[in-house]
Amino acid sequence: MILKSPHSRNIGKAGKKVLVMGILNLTPDSFSDGGSFTTPDLALRRAADIVGQGADIIDMGAESTRPDCVKISEQEELDRLMPSLKAVRKEFPDIPISIDTYKSKVAMAAIEAGADLINDVLGARYEMASDGASSPMAIVAAQTKAPIVLMHNCFDSPIAERENILEKISDSLKDSARLCIESGVDKDSIVLDPGFGFGKSAAQNLEILKNMGMLKKLGYPILLGLSRKRTLGAITGRPPHERDDETAFANLYAIFSGSADIIRVHNVEKNVIALKIFEAINSPEKWIL
């Protein structure tokens, strides 16, 4: 499936090659690197690292979605986002940019400023009509023809350990995809994300990772965003900024099982190297001397 940017940039063939999405947090309070890239100059330096290390996409976000995060207004999110987005877009005109937001007006403004795809942690469910019949974010994706990542999130309604976590996620993501398609979004512009973390226990997160093949059966590319997450720290006992090895190993597990098409990461270089080794093992004929 070729993801098509509304600005004619080549995002990549999800499903043919695993795409690496590098994280650029513009927030002061993100769990791993909050406060590190809060000005356009700092954002440009981070973007240069992401591009230089071989990422396929830059994912820019201006509101933290970590547990117990402080919600901000639409205007504050735009004030944080737009100067850095415009600077990165000007400096790097060819790299696809994803906007990590659940607010439709922020997504629209970002796409108009040159962003290529939407990464919605609430699965196009925020700002929905009371009857659940329409989704402003889905309408934005349809109007702009921007690809959209629909993530499962259960912060507000945790899934009990005894329930089938994969079934619950599948049903929710199918409903998010339906909302988008009914709003006019092309099916080939939809990517699904199981929402590693985001209200789930460590056991549930590991169950998701082990059985992500079930989500692939829904017929959409899958984005996996487990970089430096708490579950990985629970296993190794290491703090967020030291969890890049854990991240790369977990991503490779999902890639090896054929379940991840896009990986969203903080440490681009380490994951790109891991992918190169994986791809070389899968294609040894290319290395005949």
Image (cartoon, helix red, strand yellow):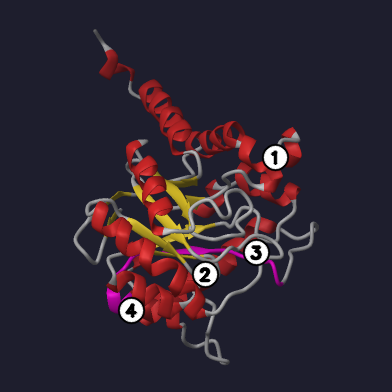
Which of pointers 3 and 2 indicates the residue nearer the eye?
A: 2
Q: Does the magenta stretch include residue 153?
A: yes
What kind of residue is marked 4?
Gly
Q: Mark 3 points at which residue?
A: 168
* Pointers 3 and 4 in contact (C-beta within 8 Å): no
- Left or right of 111? Residue 192 is right
**Sequence order check, earlier mark of 4 and 1:** 4
Which residue bears the numbered disc 2?
Answer: 123
User: At label 2, which amino acid type do we have?
Assistant: Gly
Residue identified by numbered label 4? 184
Horizontal placement of 273 versus 199: left or right?
Answer: left
- Reply above or below: 158 against 220: below
Residue type beneath disc 1: Pro
Q: Where is residue 274 in the image (x, y as percent from the top left)?
A: 46, 28
* Viewer-proximal residue among 81 and 142: 81
Camera-side mark, 4 or 1: 1
Q: Does residue 201 belong to the magenta stretch?
A: no
